[in-house]
Amino acid sequence: MRNITMRQVRSVLALNEHGKISAAARALGLTSPAVTIQLQQLEEELGFQLFLRTRSGIHATEAGEIVIESAKRIAGELTTLEERIASLKGVSAGTIRLGVVSTGKYFAPRIMAAFNRLYPGVQMTLIAANRTEIIEKLRNFEIDVALMGRPPKDFSVRTTLFGDHPLVFIAAPDHALAGKLDITKEEIAQQKFIVRERGSGTRSSFEFFMGEVAEGLTFTPTEMDSNETIKQAVMAGLGIAFISGHTIEQECQSGKLVILDVVQTPIRRQWFAVTQAAKTPTPALQALDDFLRKTGPSLLPIVSKPYRTATSQIETA
């Protein structure tokens, strides 16, 4: 394995990303035969076929998946090396691939703008997806840092807490429960509900909060896979919803939505910046980590309950 070259590593990554030798070659600025030779030499070195050739393109074998995973780590470490060497020269530069769960897209641009005002030489890209997708991208080194609620437990990560994440019940202003105080869980359980899809952090928190109250009741919420769709459905009068308070700032200010005064709410979860423990922090990532810890809370949307400030803690495990 000592004969493996960076050209071979880059070829594997390009083949995995583009799915065809011709497309990978264009991305690398090489000819198709040159990429094919790089792949063949690597396969000979390892003694395994890494990709299956089909009419629709190429697909990684089991051995190929292992090599791709290692290739991503190698590429990431090279980027880290470049940035650390640059920092020794006094160069304020670097790149950060920032991943956020769906709810995070409501404040991530605000964080990026504030951070770039302090570090204009750092280039940032933003990837927003659901929790499962963000975790997979973090696991596969496709992003450098993820902003999310519950950190993953099935691989080693570093976490930085940077703010509270309130979860609230919302309704249209003309809903029967709007303006009512001390709404109980039992009352809420009788309503028509709109919730996020299973597997989302918000859905898990909703089910945890309702707990035994939902048992024995006809409790079939309507699932929707986006916060925007849920808000529109609530405004249209299709039901009430349990949602992140960070997603409704503008609608509450404009009077299109109201926060319901449900007992033991808002539920307070937390926001974390999560990085792979196996990834060496670059100067840019260290700067972002410090920035989030010190400034992050002030950049999160403000959520105020119109009637009281009762709070409840929910496990972040």
Image: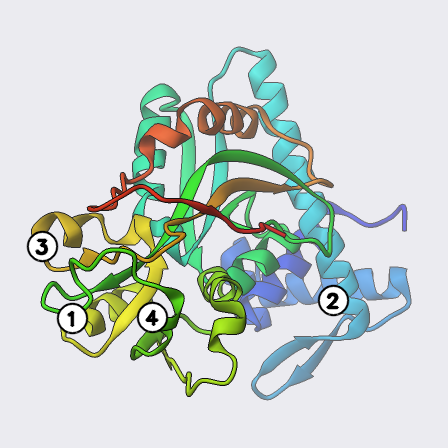
Q: Amino acid at mark 1?
A: Ala
Q: Distance from label 3 to label 2 (Cα)?
A: 51 Å
Q: At 64% from the left edge and 53% from the top edge, which residue is drawn?
A: 152
Secondary structure of the residue carrying tag 2 is helix
Q: Whole-percent x and y of residue 24?
A: 56, 64
Dot 3 or dot 1: first in sequence order is 1
Picture quadrant of residue 212: bottom right
Q: Whole-percent x and y of residue 306?
A: 20, 46
Q: Distance from label 1 to label 2 (Cα)?
A: 55 Å
Q: Amino acid at mark 2?
A: Glu
Q: Distance from label 3 to label 1 (Cα)?
A: 16 Å
Number of the label disc, if any, that sits on residue 176 = 1
Secondary structure of the residue carrying tag 1 is loop
Q: Distance from label 4 to label 3 (Cα)?
A: 21 Å
Q: Of discs 3 and 2, which sits in the foreground?
A: 3
Proximity of marks 3 and 1: CB atoms separated by less than 8 Å: no
Q: Whole-percent x and y of residue 178?
A: 17, 62
Near mark 4 (Cα within 10 A), the count class, few <14, some 14-19 or many ≥20, is some
Q: Amino acid at mark 4?
A: Ile
In the rendered image, which residue does mark 4 sit on? 188
Number of the label disc, if any, that sits on residue 103 = none
Dot 2 or dot 4: first in sequence order is 2
Q: Of discs 1 and 2, which sits in the foreground?
A: 1
Identify whether 279 is placed above or below 219. above
Secondary structure of the residue carrying tag 4 is helix
Number of the label disc, if any, that sits on residue 65 = 2
In the rendered image, which residue does mark 3 sit on? 255
Q: At 16% from the left edge and 54% from the top edge, which residue is drawn?
A: 251
